[in-house]
Image: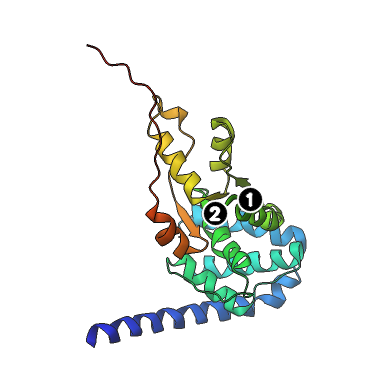
Amino acid sequence: MGLLKSLIDTEYKELKKFRRIADKIIALDDEYTKMSDEELAGNTTKLKEMLNSGHTINDEEIIVCAFATAREAASRKIGEKPYYVQLLGGLALHYGNIAELKTGEGKTLTTILPAYLNALTGKGVHVVTVNEYLTSRNAEWMRPIYEFLGLTVGVNFHDMDPEAKREVYNCDITYSTNNEIGFDYLRDNMVVKAEERVQRKLNFVILDEVDSILIDEARTPLIISGGKVNSAN
């Protein structure tokens, strides 16, 4: 019972923190709505400069500004502004939690908030889905928001050549299926020269349909052929 109470208390404290941060984001709504497009998009440069000068991605000031910026950009570019529950979901994802949103609560839009925030480091963000249709659809749907804010977006498909894949993985936001990332990782570990690898160092990932990816899909092993090996007699 003590362990159960400890878990419940921890979750309550986390949610309380998320609500406090979300309230600060909402409070900036009028200010950010009045910004010009140039001023709003310029927040990306300001936030990157703050990160380069000693701030971290978990500083509350950075989180609030980044979420408020992405929220207003979404409203301007696709006509949808994340609601309070989506802010809570985005904060939960940023802090490494599983967020369950009901059908219609906007999971795809929720992901732009932590994706934008973590992409500010320049180390890349992966948004992972279970099939290429969702990967392509979600990337093209959210692309105007990211590009408005000065970030690059790449979509990873199975039939790409290594050069194209390398370019995709070097984007600020990379949309891909879980299987393709897995196979690219395996192929990267089979190359002769390090520069032939397509992936860069992994940084931050958002899993769409986490139960499918980490439970259902995880039951199927990824198998790749190493080709013919010539050995000396």
* Disc with the residue nearer the chain's start (1 vs 2): 2
Q: Check contact, mark 1 vs mark 2: CB within 8 A.
A: yes
User: Where does label 2 land, which residue?
Assistant: 119
Q: Quadrant of the N terminus?
A: bottom left
User: What residue is drawn where x is 55% and y is 59%?
Assistant: 115
Residue 231 location in percent, x, y? 27, 16
Which quarter of the picture shows residue 47? Answer: bottom right
Quick check: 130 left or right of 138? left
Q: Can residue 55 be seen in this snapshot?
A: no
Observer-nearest of 160 and 29: 160
Observer-nearest of 56 and 191: 191
Residue 119, relative to residue 181: is it above or below? below
User: What residue is drawn where x is 43% and y is 69%?
Assistant: 97
Q: Secondary structure at mark 2?
A: helix
User: What residue is drawn where x is 47% and y is 62%?
Assistant: 212
Residue 100 location in percent, x, y? 50, 74
Q: Would you call the spot at circle 2 few (<14 residues within 10 Å), some (14-19), or many (20 or more)?
A: many
User: What residue is drawn where x is 64% and y is 57%?
Assistant: 138
Q: Amino acid at mark 2?
A: Ala
Quick check: 137 left or right of 85? right
Q: Amino acid at mark 1?
A: Leu
Q: Measure how far apart labels 1 and 2 are at the Cα level.
A: 8 Å
Q: Secondary structure at mark 1?
A: loop
User: Where does label 1 land, which residue?
Assistant: 151
